[in-house]
Amino acid sequence: MKIIFRESNEKLFLNKWEEYINNNLASYKYLPIYLEYMLFYTSSLVYDKSFVIIEQNKCVAICFLPIENNDNTNIISLANGYTIAPLAINKRIEKDVFAQIDLIAKENDIKKIKFYLDPLIIEY
């Protein structure tokens, strides 16, 4: 398992993100252009810790992870609201995704995480 963060290798990250979207069910809210638009309009963004997980050179999970600071508190959110939940190809990979989110939350003193489930994703 290999984790690619957007901040460390944006070209590979975007390539693998697109691969996941092209090969799995996802709504328009996971399109990179839509995510860029959303990031552009948030005024409290501190970091974008988005990542993908690769196994056997295949993208098996995507996670959009904007970290904002609201009222001197770090939270995972988008414009102080909810952001899209991560997607993974199976429950084992999903556990790895949330373990990585927990690690990022600890490293960045995250006090709250605000995900929502997109109703356009039938896997939910």
Image (spheres, rainbow, N blue to C red):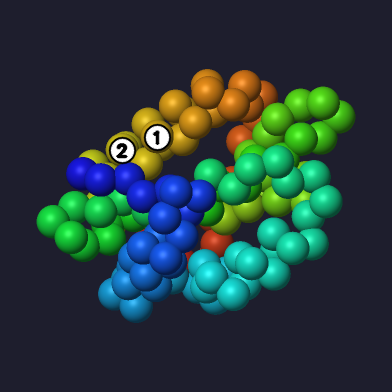
Q: Front-most of 30 and 27?
A: 30
64, above or below 24, in the image: above
Q: Badges 2 and 1: C-beta atoms under 8 Å apart?
A: yes
Residue 3 in which image quadrant: top left
**Residue ID at (76%, 26%):** 73
User: Label 1: which residue?
Assistant: 100
Q: What label sits on residue 45 in the rendered view?
A: none
Where is residue 41? Give x, y as percent.
Answer: 79, 62
**Residue ID at (47%, 53%):** 6
Furthest toward the left, the residue is 56
Q: Is residue 3 left or right of residue 108?
A: left
Furthest toward the right, the residue is 71
Q: Is residue 68 left or right of residue 48?
A: right
Q: Is residue 85 visible?
A: no
* Element carrying mark 2: helix
User: Label 2: which residue?
Assistant: 96
Badge 1, how many Cα within 10 Å: few under 14, some, many 20+?
some
Where is residue 25? Give x, y as percent.
Answer: 37, 72
Where is residue 24? Give x, y as percent.
Answer: 32, 71
Where is residue 80? Give x, y as percent.
Answer: 78, 45
Q: CA distance from mark 2 to mark 1?
A: 6 Å
**What is the three-letter code of the residue carrying label 1?**
Gln
Q: Quadrant of the C terminus?
A: bottom left
2, above or below 118, in the image: above
27, above or below 93, in the image: below
Q: Front-most of 124 and 62?
A: 62
**Residue ID at (36%, 63%):** 12
Badge 2, how many Cα within 10 Å: few under 14, some, many 20+?
some
Q: Is residue 65 visible?
A: yes
* Element carrying mark 1: helix
**What is the three-letter code of the residue carrying label 2?**
Asp
Q: Front-most of 22 and 89?
A: 22
